[in-house]
Image (tube, rainbow, N blue to C red):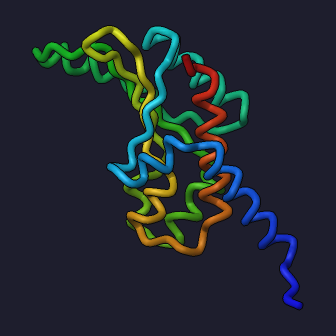
Amino acid sequence: MMKISNAILSAALITAMAVLAQVSTAEAAERDGVVTVKSRYSVSETVNRIKHSVEDKGITLFDDIDQAKLGNAAGNDVPPSRLVVFGNPALGTTFITANPLAGLDWPVRVLVYQAKDGSVYAAYTDFGWIAKRHRILSRDREFAIASQVIEAVTATIKE
């Protein structure tokens, strides 16, 4: 009979829970890797809730870039759009150690934008898709944790 270590079993359970909890994530990985969550709040309130959730979890908030403000100042008509950048260096850099090109997708970025119909969305890159994109096969547990964190962060804004 084969023995399975607790660490391997835990990683498998975490991965399974993340997959089951995120049907939209699985669909995103098949398409373009983008997960979109509809918000019940304005762009500003959505960003504030995401930032508070990040801070409450002890995650580092790196930036909040107001793309609309920058674009409008440059003469473009840009609807509300903000990019929130955050992460946990201890977790995120494990992906970079597996493949330096993963630095293209770290730290985590969540785009909060207003659609033409006035609806507000938060969009981010699916972590399974990131793993596949960078051919990282050795960080399943870490990707599962990252998936759980982004789900928890965006849960505060879901419609």
47, above or below 101, in the image: above
For this rendering, which residue is in front, 67 or 2?
Answer: 2
- Say which residue appears at 42% left-offset and 46% top-offset: 28
- Say which residue appears at 34% left-offset and 16% top-offset: 114
Classify residue 149 by image quadrant: top right
Q: Is residue 89 left or right of residue 11?
A: left
The quadrant of the image that shows the C terminus is top right
The quadrant of the image that shows the N terminus is bottom right
Q: Is residue 34 left or right of residue 108?
A: left
Classify residue 57 by image quadrant: top right
51, above or below 1, in the image: above
Classify residue 16 by image quadrant: bottom right
Rendered location of residue 37, percent (x, y): 48, 28
- Say which residue appears at 64% left-offset and 55% top-offset: 144
Rendered location of residue 123, percent (x, y): 42, 33
Rendered location of residue 5, percent (x, y): 85, 78
For this rendering, which residue is in front, 103 or 50?
Answer: 50
